Amino acid sequence: MINWHQLDPQQALRELNVDASQGLSSPEAVRRLAEYGRNELAERRAKSPWLILWEQLTAPMVLILIVAAIISTLLTDYKDVIAIGVIVVLKAHVMAIRSERLSLFRLGLLSNKPLLAAVILTGILQLGLVYLPFLQSVFRTIALPVLDLALSIAVTAAIFWAVEFEKWFIHRQEATR
């Protein structure tokens, strides 16, 4: 298979047996149209929002969280149920509104305003649960030491980079086909 994107224009013209100054003759254009068909990309139907939501809610990590919520309910630890429920809903929402194929850096860090707002809101809520005294008493949390907070941010960042690497890897695999 020829990697057309790596060829300079003159090499591409030679491979295609085309004269740059005259282009294809009409009979040759008709022949190639009959042999190869129209120069069009096959349209893929966009996934419906409901299908995306279903895929997110049936992801293994979400299923594990749902089972944990059910177990917590049976043990009557409702605070854990609420926390797990919030995590499931936020994960499904954030994953549904992010780009499935393009890296965030290719799209632009500020290109997806709903995702950016969800990430900021989640961060604020998490910090509130840990550091605001009235929420600490409700959820029985304690303020994290700075090192633990840094570790938490590092783990979250590692997940982000893993997803971005996965998209880069898939894009690279598709490009070599």
Image (spheres, rainbow, N blue to C red):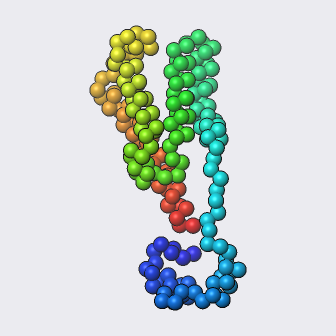
Answer whether residue 157 is visible to the viewer in this image. Answer: yes
Q: Is residue 78 above or below residue 157?
A: above
Percent x, y of residue 123: 39, 29
98 displayed left or right of 145? right
Q: Quadrant of the C terminus?
A: bottom right
Q: Quadrant of the N terminus?
A: bottom right
Q: Quadrant of residue 24?
A: bottom right
Q: Is residue 121 above or below residue 76?
A: below
Percent x, y of residue 171: 51, 58
Q: Is residue 29 above or below residue 67?
A: below
Q: Is residue 145 above or below residue 101?
A: above
Work out whether residue 154 or residue 168 is closer to the camera in this orientation and state it: 168
Q: Residue furthest right?
A: 34
Q: Residue at x 60, y 12 (%)?
A: 75
Work out whether residue 168 or residue 17 is closer to the camera in this orientation and state it: 17
Q: Residue at x 65, y 41 (%)?
A: 51
Q: Residue at x 33, y 22 (%)?
A: 144
Percent x, y of residue 44: 64, 56
Q: Residue at x 68, y 85 (%)?
A: 31
